[in-house]
Amino acid sequence: MARPKGSTARKTTAKRTTTKKTAVAKKAVSSVPAAVKNAEAALVKLTKELEQLRKQSAAAANKLEAASARVAKSPTAAAKKALVKNRGDVRKLATKLKASRAKVGAARIKLAEEKRKARAVAKQAQQVAKEEALAANMAAKVEADLAKALAAFEIKWRKQRTRSDNEKLRARAKRAAATKKANAAKAKEKAKAKTAVKKVATAKKTPTSKTAVTSAPKRRGRPPKAKA
């Protein structure tokens, strides 16, 4: 017969919860300082010793009571000797019991002190972790703000640089156009001057009618006689 799905889901959830609780418990145990563990172990040991002494003291008291009853019933030397011995054992155990109680009390005070110190250290560690987290968040915010500021500055700088470069290019093109115009004017003037020089030179080379008669070669000697 198939199991219902709801039951399987509940079991899975319960298993996960148990695993999580176990992990938390292990983490809590591992986070207990060594001084607290040692103080707890010492208290447990002294408490066991105290319980053992209490049992021994109760047994000795019972023996003393029985010895007292025997002496009262039959006050023999042996009974009296046993009574004295039992009284000594009870006094010794009472002294040990008193000392053991004092040790247990001191161990409890020691454990409480170690726990107080551990809480103070844990609180300080939490404060340090909190401050470190805050510092990390502030550092991350600084980096983010810096990146944003650099991006804004880059955009502004690029716009200004593009505008400056465009102005330089326009000025350069303007100077180039002016230079080209000036060079063209100079070339035109030079061409005019050259043409004028050519015209002058051509005019000098081409003789006029007066210049041709004047420049005809003269014959030497007497002129020829006229025929009758």
Image (spheres, rainbow, N blue to C red):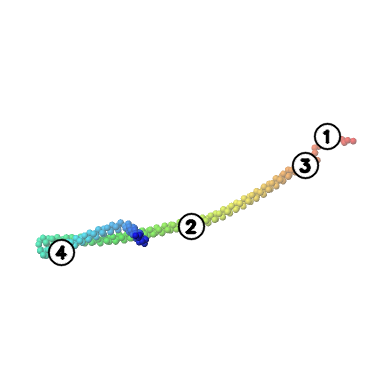
> Taking the image as drawn, is residue 173 in sight?
yes
What amino acid is found at the position of numbered circle 3 in the picture?
A: Pro
Q: Earlier in the sequence, mark 2 or mark 4?
A: 4
User: For mark 2, what is the residue?
Assistant: 148
* Residue 128 quadrant: bottom left
- The Cα atoms of the two marked residues, 3 and 4, are separated by 179 Å
Q: Which residue is mark 3?
A: 207
Q: Secondary structure at mark 3?
A: loop
Dot 1 lies on which element? Answer: loop
The residue under label 1 is 221
Q: CA distance from mark 3 to mark 1?
A: 28 Å
Question: Quarter of the image containing the N terminus?
Answer: bottom left
Residue 14 placement (x, y as % from top left)? 34, 60
Identity, as a three-letter code, of the amino acid under mark 4: Glu
Return the disc, 2 or 1, that comes first in the chain's sequence: 2
Percent across and percent down for residue 112 are 29, 61
Label 3 vs label 4, nearer the camera: 4
